[in-house]
Amino acid sequence: MGVHALVLAAGRGTRTRGEMPKALLPLLGLPLLEHVLRAVRAAGAGEVTVVVGHGAGQVEPALAGWDLRFIRQDPPLGTGHAVRTARAAHAVPGPLLVLNGDLPLLRDETLAGLLAAHREGRAAATLLTAVLDDGGPYGRVVRDERGGVTRIVEARDASPEERAIGEINVGAYVFETAPLDAALARLEAHNAQGEFYLTDTVAHLQAAGHSIAACVAADPHEALGVNTLAELADASRRLRERRLAELMAAGVRVEDPSSTHVDADAVVEPDAVVRPFTLIEGRSIVRSGASVGPFARLVDVVVGRGAQVLDHCLLRQCVLEDGASVGPFSHLRPESRIGAGARVGNFVELKKTHLGAGSKAQHLSYLGDATVGEGVNIGAGTITCNYDGAQKHPTRIEARAFVGSDATLVAPVVVGEGSYVAAGSTITEDVPKDALAVGRARQVTKPGWAARRRARLDAAKAKG
């Protein structure tokens, strides 16, 4: 059985200045709290309880797939009160991993190391600490002359000497529950915030004769919490750098990591190329040999082997099969699929359209609610008129059809296999297989008309 974990996520997040609960702030494609939960589960935690407060009605459903126990803290009276509330509602015996829910940079291996240190040290409590050049708003870890931990003092309540201490409390602990419960019962709110601090349990445990251990994080940046939008942006930058370093180590060619973003759940396979100013978001998958960018954004997109997404493209919830090419300046909307070897060119938009293998829509076209067979040519300026103001209607263009430039296909309509649509045509009826459809006005040519017009204008100017 894994250790029980208690994640504290009841804070309002007033310094973010927004209505969204801090736990749900987006970070590398995930809610902030989910980064913490992933680290906790990967470190070996079994049952996980989350203390929620502000925005609980939003936080709980957002994390419904995580098999969590939620406990509400109302009113929010500090971290000590949160743990006391959780223990009163669900007093699980054995070691208890407690950590703040705003630590997205904390790695699972660091938490695993904390748990191992607690098991080996047999202390009543083991805290995770970090050493920073400037401890800023973080609680300071006070040690005695022998190096033992005696207490944690919050920055607001610290003396100048205590604020000069470089070792800070990360906000992750492992407690033995019996001494913890006794220490929680002795907490008082005699501090600048008028709250019950979990950190005060350290001094109570020490006074009761229990041993307190500390485990120093190898990377002090893991201690950085998120309380402001500036800190959220900093955490995003660090997580992005970490993610890209992992991808490059695995064989992905990221040409400019400083301008590239890949979400936590996106997959980029070895030998793929990600060019500058590219965002790969959601659950996108970029297969081996594919290239994306520059200046491209993919959201929940599958890019097949050897496929290309060229400059300045936006793709959402669509699929590019092997060897397909999109761009530059293409927009692929949800439920579109580009067949193997097919090409979508500049200033082309697709919506809920399947473009068959080897087909081409190279220039200035819109295809909506369309099914296009294999080997079809879509001429420049072609559009499918799929919306009549009330309903969407389908267009079907069958294999090896040729649609000339500036054609308008008024749905519902079928262009048959191997047929031709003449340039400039408006097609309102089905086109049979192997037929030619011409739907345009007859051209009228008047010889000499332009010369006569110029003569009249010149005469008028001479008189005027």
Image (spheres, rainbow, N blue to C red):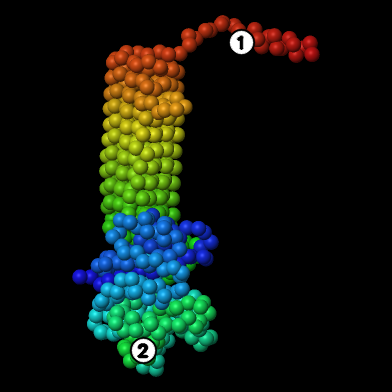
Q: Is residue 138 above or below residue 454?
A: below
Residue at far right of view: 464
Check disc 2 and give the amino acid type. Gln
Please tell me which residue is depicted at 28% across the width and 47% down the height of the picture: 287
**Secondary element at tag 1:** helix
Which residue is more in the foreground, 463 or 341? 341
The number of numbered discs placed on residues in the rendered structure image is: 2
x and y percentages locating residue 430 in the rendered image: 34, 16
Residue assigned mark 1: 450
Measuring from the top left, give residue 285's x and y in whole percent: 30, 48
Residue 131 in sight here: no
| Structural crowding at the residue carrying mark 1, measured as other residues with C-alpha within 10 Å and reported as few (<14), some (14–19) or many (≥20) | few
Question: Hey, what amino acid is under mark 1?
Answer: Ala
Q: Residue furthest top?
A: 447
Residue 109: which disc? none
Whole-Å distance between the Cαs marked 2 and 1?
Answer: 102 Å
Q: Residues within 10 Å of mark 2 (few under 14, many from 20)?
A: some
The residue under the point 28% across, 60% down is 67
Give the percent coordinates (x, y) of residue 417. 28, 19
- Residue on which the image places disc 2: 206
Name the foreground residue: 203 vs 107: 203
Would you identify the image quadrant in which residue 169 lies?
Answer: bottom left
Decide if residue 389 is in sight here.
yes
Q: For the view shown, which residue lies furthest in the bottom direction?
A: 145
Q: In the picture provided, is 264 more to the left or to the right than 164?
A: left
Name the residue rendered at 38%, 82% in the picture.
Answer: 185
**Residue 43, image x and y in percent?**
27, 69
Is residue 7 shown above or below 150? above
In the rendered image, the quadrant that contains the N terminus is bottom left
Q: Residue furthest left?
A: 1
Q: Quadrant of residue 329?
A: top left
SS at circle 2: helix
